[in-house]
Image (cartoon, rainbow, N blue to C red):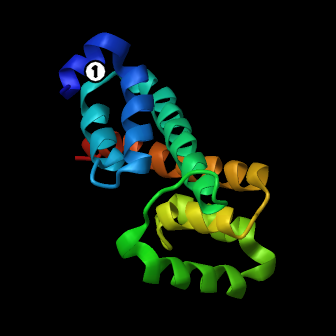
């Protein structure tokens, strides 16, 4: 199924939710590139809902990774094994600031939010705190991404 078919079936808001969800599980699909393209095609009043629905789609996907980290789902992390250990080390370094680490990861992508989601589950962090910090971070990230092209165009 291609992008046009998805948008035709579920609309731009539904497509944003679905594409972001899939992207949250399969890093080969890039939500950020999707959002830049969409921001050039839709009316400005649609940008914030698209950003927020994309953040929601990502958190739904990261919830699966979170619970996979807890062992509820089996996801082969294969090539990420060394990176998972590095992220676990970061969590230990940021011991009392874990919410901030999740927020930073979700906002700027360092350390990768994909891995942070898995490790947060493996370390048995509180899911609600993880989801709130992650949703806030992704909302900030995606809102900046959808409005950035509009700002650039306005000042050119």
* Residue 148 in sight: no
> Residue at left 46%, top 46%?
142
Question: Which image quadrant for residue 98?
Answer: bottom right
Image quadrant for the N terminus? Answer: top left
Q: SS at mark 1?
A: helix
> Residue at left 34%, top 55%?
27
Q: Above or below — where is 139 with respect to 17? A: below
> Residue at left 64%, top 52%?
72
Pinpoint residue 111: horizontal percent, then vertical percent: 50, 73
Q: Above or below — where is 84 with respect to 127? A: below
Pinpoint residue 24: horizontal percent, then vertical percent: 44, 48
Crowding around mark 1 (Cα neighbors within 10 Å: few <14, some 14 to 19, many 20+) is some
Of 151 and 30, which appears nearest the observer?
30
Q: Above or below — where is 47 with respect to 60? A: above
Of 77 and 43, which appears nearest the observer?
77
Apparent side of residue 151 relative to residue 55 in the rendered image (left or right): left
> Residue at left 38%, top 70%?
78
Apparent side of residue 24 relative to residue 103 in the rendered image (left or right): left
Of 1 and 45, which appears nearest the observer?
1
Q: Which residue is mark 1?
A: 6
Pinpoint residue 69: horizontal percent, then vertical percent: 61, 62
Q: How many marks?
A: 1
* Residue 39 in sight: yes
């Amino acid at each position: 199924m291609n992008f046009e078919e998805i948008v035709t079936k579920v609309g731009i808001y539904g497509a944003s939710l679905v594409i972001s969800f899939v992207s949250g599980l399969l890093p080969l699909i890039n939500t950020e590139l999707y959002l830049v393209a969409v921001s050039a095609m839709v009316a400005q009043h649609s940008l914030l809902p698209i950003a927020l629905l994309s953040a929601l789609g990502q958190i739904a996907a990261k919830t699966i990774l979170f619970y996979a980290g807890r062992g509820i789902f089996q996801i082969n992390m294969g090539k990420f094994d060394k990176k998972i250990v590095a992220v676990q080390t970061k969590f230990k370094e940021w011991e009392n600031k874990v919410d901030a680490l999740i927020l930073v990861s979700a906002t700027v992508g360092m350390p990768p939010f994909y891995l942070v989601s898995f490790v947060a589950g493996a370390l048995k962090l509180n899911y609600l705190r993880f989801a709130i910090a992650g949703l806030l971070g992704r909302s900030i990230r995606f809102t900046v991404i959808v409005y950035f092209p509009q700002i650039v165009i306005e000042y050119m």
